[in-house]
Amino acid sequence: MSARIGVITFPGSLDDRDARRAIRVAGAEPVALWHGSHDLEGVDALVLPGGFSYGDYLRAGAIAAHAPIMSEVSDAAAKGMPILGICNGFQMLVEAHLLPGGLIRNAHQQFIRRDQRLRVENSSTAWTSDFADGQEIVIPLKNADGGYIAAESELDRLEGEGLVAFRYLGVNPNGSLRDIAGLSNERGNVVGLMPHPEHAVEEGFGPNTREAMRSGTDGIGFFTSAVAAVVGAAA
């Protein structure tokens, strides 16, 4: 079986093509989907990509969370479909209440672009099974509204239930509370994070490593994990 993974394009999406390429590199079939449609075209998983949907007016991801296709995204999430929100896609998932908390302007009020160290905190989700708990990875990050916030009681719940999927290491680039870089829902099928794994899937195009410049491919594990989850569910 070849997994079919949809990537939804919104007005202002920037990284939808990169996400489709990452899916192809991982051995799955990328399917381009449109924000104004109500048809998920029978895909097995979904990616909400990075960018500045609707110009980030009102709040980042807030308008996109009410796009026509998001009703189908919510239904698919409830049925257990693997869904990944990357950067602006993470903001959409939060605004659509598919993940808790909120994302606000970076602490220093600046757009940040850097290769970011992360620690994998939860390897039991549909998007992280090819990693190990505690594994350190490097993924590019680029955002202006990446500060994760939630009430202290909610943060305690996320920590206690193991729903923090990734944590910033070395530097907290945007002031996210408790260094949270990404989250999972309780079921483990919905994951959101601010860094961009789709920019670290091919040698020659990813972060620098000790071995060679631009040779980092830590991001491919997100997409191979999803392929394994889809194939395993169909077996």
Image (tube, rainbow, N blue to C red):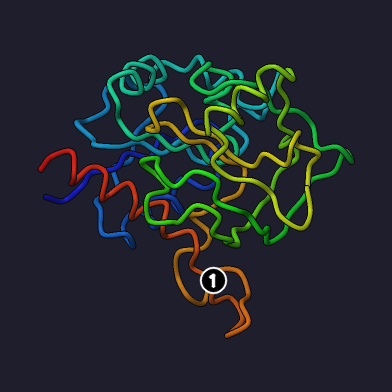
Nearer the observer, 211 or 44:
211
* Foreground pick, 10 / 100: 100
Q: Considering depth in this image, is 81 or 170 the residue closer to the camera? A: 170
Say above or below: 84 vs 94.
below
Seen as rendered, the residue at the extreme front is: 160
Residue 4, horizontal then vertical, whole percent: 23, 44
- Locate the C terminus and report the quarter of the image it occupies: top left
What amino acid is at disc 1? Gly
The residue that appears at 57% across and 23% down in the rendered structure is 94
Q: Which residue does the numbered mark 1 point to in the structure image?
A: 216
Give the residue at x 66% y 27%: 60
Tell whether 189 sits left or right of 44. Answer: right
| Image coordinates for residue 164, horizontal then vertical, percent | 57, 36
Residue 178 higher or lower than 198, as above or below: above
Residue at horizontal 38%, vertical 14%?
Answer: 71
Q: In this view, does 151 lie above or below 183?
A: above
